[in-house]
Structure formats: structure tokens, C-alpha cells
């Protein structure tokens, strides 16, 4: 079993356990009662300076433990004060040590859109994301068939959310475009092997249609990496490890000051 397949299996097992406690009908009612979702598409609209999607991330399968983060809402508030456009919250439990409680805490603290970053493959997970206050969900092309991808994106949008549709090669990008994605991420990390290729975004960005938000994901260690993505054409950069393992306030302020230099 690939790493990605094992992550989906664990996430879906956890979701099934939650569904035994709180059924789909209840979660749908909770989603309907939640405060309206914020407009993540507008929050990531192209501008001169690159947007940063700043991530609350305790651990990863490739790096292990990264940061303790006893108070995710406090970290999210630091991100917001220092210019983040969106907060990403890892809610996967087994390998990333996150939870929906982290998402709820962050949503209660900040006034910018919040992304639920998890291995989402069922309508239950989409409804519980909205019930917990998510404005944006992650959908990974490599983990879904085309019909699932379209159905989950459409469901998210029917609930007022947006979907960040993640790709990592040309075929997946074609699928994301065909599915109607309006926010497309290119992940420098191959989720089947976890190998990184920082050049992947630059090699694919020109194939992303005009009007679609272009997000570069992974392989960010310092401001030069953010600048390289911005110069290549990224509207936004998703950053986790570099922020949680350093000084989040100082680094984020430096990252959000980046603007493209010259033509790309």
C-alpha cells in the first residue's frame, strides 16, 4: 500500500468512527447552522504580493514530529497578524497529529478563511468540515476518482466553501482543470513517495487557465523559495514546516512581502 493510500485509509477509518457517534443527518444540520463560510476564492485573488496559506502543522509522515503547538488558535492569530491570507489546519490524527478540535479553535480565533487539510473522500467529511467552521477544503486528485472529485467540489461549493484541488503532475492538472477547479495547487511533494521536486510548480503553472488561483505547495524552507514560486507565477504559497519550526511572526512577515520580479 502506498503512503497516500494508507493516509486515506486511516482518515476514512477515523471519519467512520466519528460517524458512529454523530450521524450524517446530524452533521448536515450542524453544517447548515454554522456561520456562513468566508470567501476563500476572494481572499486568494491575485495581487502584487504573494498570498501565504499558513499552516498549523504538528507533524508529517516524511519528517515526523515538527512542533508541539499546544494552542493552535494562538499560532493562527500570529499568522493572521503577520499577513496570512488563509490558515490551513491539519485535521488528520494518525500521522499529522491534528483534529477537528484544532480547526474549531482556529475558526473561533481568526477572521480570515480556514482550510481543512485532510484526506477527504466522503460527503460526511465535507459536511463535518463546514460544521467545524471550514471555509475551504483540500481535495487531492491522486486520491480520488474523477466522479468523486467533481461531486465533492460541488458539495463544498453548495455549502458556501471552496476547494483547493491538489495536483502533482500534468495528468492530474488536466483532471483538476476538467473537474472545474477554481483553486489549483501544485504540490512539489509526490504523495506516493514523498520525494520533493521544487521545479514541479514552474513546469506546470503555464497550463493553469487564467482566472484560476495558482497555489504552490511544499518545498519551502526560506524566503528565496517563496520568491522562486512567486516569480514562476504563484498567486499563493502554502507553507507549514518553515513556519512552525522557526519564528512564525518574523518569517511570515518576510514571506508575505515577496512580489514577483520581472516577467514570468
Image: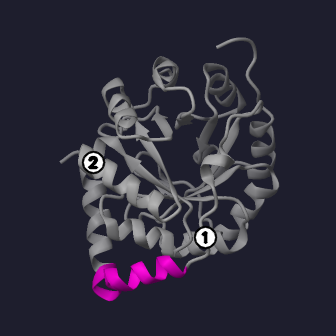
**Percent from the top left, x then y, of residue 179?**
35, 40
| Label 1: few (<14), some (14–19) or many (≥20) C-alpha neighbours in 10 Å | some
Instruction: Identify which residue, 174 or 21, lies in the foreground.
Output: 174
Residue matched to label 1: 36
Q: How many marks?
A: 2
**Percent from the top left, x then y, of residue 97?**
46, 65
Camera sees residue 202:
yes
**Percent from the top left, x then y, of residue 52?**
67, 43
Residue matched to label 2: 144
Location of residue 19 by image quarter? bottom left
Q: Is residue 258 rendered to the left or right of residue 169?
A: right
Name above or below for residue 167 compared with residue 27.
Answer: above
Find numbered disc 1 in the image and state the secondary structure of the residue it sits on.
loop
Instruction: Identify which residue, 183 or 232, lies in the foreground.
Output: 183
Find numbered disc 2 in the image and state the secondary structure of the residue it sits on.
loop
Q: Which marked residue is nearer to the observer: mark 1 or mark 2?
A: 1
Identify the disc placed on residue 117.
none
**Percent from the top left, x then y, of residue 161?**
52, 59
Q: Is residue 78 rendered to the left or right of residue 88?
A: right
Q: Magenta residues? A: 18-33
**Residue name at image x 51 percent, y 23 percent:** 205
Location of residue 110 by image quarter? bottom right
Residue ranking furthest to the left: 1
Nearest to N terminus: mark 1 or mark 2 = 1
Name above or below for residue 138 compared with residue 160.
Answer: above
Amino acid at each position: 500500500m502506498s503512503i497516500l493510500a494508507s493516509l486515506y485509509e486511516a482518515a476514512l477509518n477515523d471519519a467512520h468512527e466519528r460517524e458512529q457517534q454523530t450521524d450524517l443527518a446530524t452533521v448536515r444540520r450542524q453544517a447548515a447552522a454554522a456561520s456562513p463560510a468566508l470567501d476563500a476564492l476572494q481572499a486568494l485573488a491575485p495581487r502584487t504580493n504573494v498570498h501565504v496559506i499558513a499552516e498549523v502543522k504538528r507533524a508529517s509522515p516524511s519528517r515526523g514530529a515538527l512542533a508541539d503547538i499546544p494552542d493552535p488558535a494562538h499560532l493562527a492569530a500570529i499568522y493572521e497578524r503577520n499577513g496570512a491570507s488563509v490558515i490551513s489546519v491539519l485535521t488528520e490524527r494518525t500521522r499529522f497529529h491534528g483534529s477537528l478540535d484544532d480547526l474549531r479553535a482556529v475558526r473561533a480565533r481568526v477572521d480570515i478563511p480556514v482550510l481543512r487539510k485532510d484526506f477527504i473522500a466522503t460527503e460526511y467529511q465535507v459536511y463535518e468540515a463546514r460544521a467545524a467552521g471550514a471555509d475551504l477544503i483540500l481535495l487531492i486528485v491522486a486520491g480520488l476518482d474523477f466522479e468523486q472529485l467533481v461531486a465533492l467540489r460541488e458539495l463544498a461549493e453548495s455549502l458556501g466553501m471552496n476547494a483547493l484541488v491538489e495536483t502533482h503532475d500534468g495528468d492530474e492538472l488536466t483532471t483538476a482543470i476538467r473537474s472545474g477547479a477554481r483553486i489549483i495547487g501544485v504540490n512539489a511533494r509526490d504523495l506516493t513517495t514523498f520525494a520533493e521536486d521544487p521545479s514541479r510548480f514552474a513546469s506546470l503553472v503555464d497550463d493553469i487557465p487564467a482566472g484560476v488561483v495558482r497555489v504552490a505547495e511544499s518545498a519551502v524552507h526560506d524566503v528565496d523559495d517563496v520568491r522562486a514560486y512567486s516569480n514562476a507565477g504563484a498567486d499563493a504559497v502554502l507553507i507549514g514546516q518553515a513556519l512552525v519550526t522557526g519564528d512564525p511572526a518574523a518569517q511570515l512577515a518576510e514571506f508575505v512581502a515577496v512580489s514577483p520580479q520581472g516577467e514570468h
